[in-house]
Image (cartoon, grey):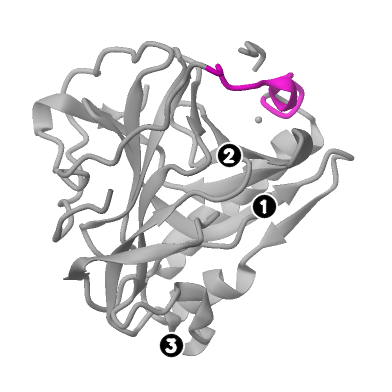
Amino acid sequence: MAEETAHAPVNGSALGPPAGTGAKPPATASATPAHAPAPARTGASAPARTGAPTARWPRGSHILWRYRENGGPRVHICRPVTVVQDTEDLLAVWVAPGTPCVKPVLADGTPIHAEPLASRYTRPRTVALGHWRGTGLLKLARPGRPWSVWLFWEPGWRFKNWYVNLEEPLARWSGGVDSEDHFLDISVRPDRSWRWLDEDEFAQAQREGLMDPAKARSVRQAGWAAVEAITAWEPPFSESWPDWRPDPRWTVPPLPDDWDRGPTPESSHQSS
């Protein structure tokens, strides 16, 4: 999972072990192109997945895209995003440069990926405030699919690559969407070549008990289904999203104080 860089502790709110992150360095998705530190939080419980669907979000509205910790119920990644498109077939959102985000770090503030893999998922953790760096990120998710597709650009809007983030299908609630990262990812280049990413983390997560064998098989199967979509050059890869640009009138979404609030049963459901 792509990760923002600079960070500051969110008042030292400890999450504790083991809490796999799935956060990964950037690697770097159809066709409707358009032109403050948070207070201490303990993390929300896993979202309920029942109830009536939430209303569609208008273009330009701000919602939260969140991930629960692996092996636990609490939110440890939160990114305020701007809605690009929200239909029965697709949710597309924009992570603007400079967006304030919450991410996991080790309890002493060490970045997750500075820790050796052998102890990366066992050392105590907290959450920290960061800001999204670089050129921004477009996320595309189709209802019920166990992955989302992210688009990255180089400076000057030169398209870099698609990034398939394997994850739980998004659960919608009134304030945004929730998921859980599955460690394994896929990078797709403009020449249509692809490669697996973070297989070492995927294997380590299994060794640490953050993913049982049945779940690991399901995640790998989802990855191969994504590869089939890539090799067949299906949407969103075949669509014009690399030419998309954010509306220049959009502002950077704020990070709300209650970024880890728990969805209520009547306001959340699996994305549909």
According to the image, label 1 marks what residue?
186
- C-alpha gap between disc 1 and disc 2: 19 Å
- Residue sitting at 45 percent across and 12 percent down? 87
Q: Is residue 10 left or right of residue 179?
A: left
The x and y percentages for residue 79 are 38, 43
Which SS class for mark 1?
A: strand
Which SS class for mark 2?
A: loop
- C-alpha gap between disc 1 and disc 3: 24 Å
The x and y percentages for residue 7 are 40, 63
Mark 1, Cα crowd under 10 Å, few <14 / some 14-19 / many 20+, is: many
Residue type at numbered disc 3: Ser
Q: Is residue 183 left or right of residue 168?
A: right
Please provide the residue range marked out in magenta. Answer: 236-248
According to the image, label 3 marks what residue?
119
Q: Are marks 3 and 2 in contact (CB under 8 Å)?
A: no
Residue type at numbered disc 2: Gly
- Residue sitting at 43 percent across and 25 percent down? 251
